[in-house]
Amino acid sequence: MKKYLLVLLAVLGVAFTSTAQEKKSKNAKVDVEVKGNCDMCKKRIEKAAFGVKGVKSAEWHSDDQTLHLIIDENKTTALKVQESVAKAGHDTKEVKAEKNTYDNLHGCCQYDRES
């Protein structure tokens, strides 16, 4: 009987430990490099970021080409936000916008793309 009790306690201990390690932050600060030029870019980038469920704050700065995010990691990831921004026509470090989407941006919004 003692063996069964010890095994049960060991299993429960592992279950509680693994559950505690999976907990993610509800207010994670993330910075993402996003290419753009102007205020129209800023509006488009921020709108794309806010379109992702779990994004609590999104602010893009043209001077350092950085999108500053606060996200709920239980609902989204930085990669999902980058994918949304790329669909709007803006390259990130990890996800590139499709050529036709980029080509449809206003002339002043077409930044220098890296090959």
Image (spheres, rainbow, N blue to C red):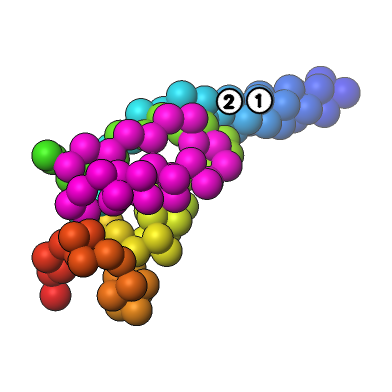
Instruction: Decide if residue 71 is on the left or right side of residue 110.
Output: right
Between 107 and 112, the one nearer to me in the picture = 107
| Quarter residue 47 falls in | top left
* Whether label 1 touches label 2, CB < 8 Å: yes
Residue 6 placed where, x, y %? 74, 23
Badge 1 element: helix
Q: Mark 2: which amino acid?
A: Ala
Total residue callouts: 2
Provide the residue span drawn in magenta: 36-62
Between 48 and 40, the one nearer to me in the picture = 40
Q: In this rendering, is residue 69 above or below 87?
A: above
Q: Mark 1: which amino acid?
A: Phe
**Dot 2 alpha-carbon crowd within 10 angstroms: few under 14, some 14 to 19, many 20 or more:** few
Q: Residue at x 28, y 75 (%)?
A: 103
**Dot 1 alpha-carbon crowd within 10 angstroms: few under 14, some 14 to 19, many 20 or more:** few
The residue at the far bottom in this view is 100
Q: Residue at x 27, y 56 (%)?
A: 92
Q: In this rendering, is residue 42 above or below 28?
A: below
Quadrant location, the N terminus? top right
Q: Which residue is mark 1?
A: 16
Q: Which residue is mark 2?
A: 20
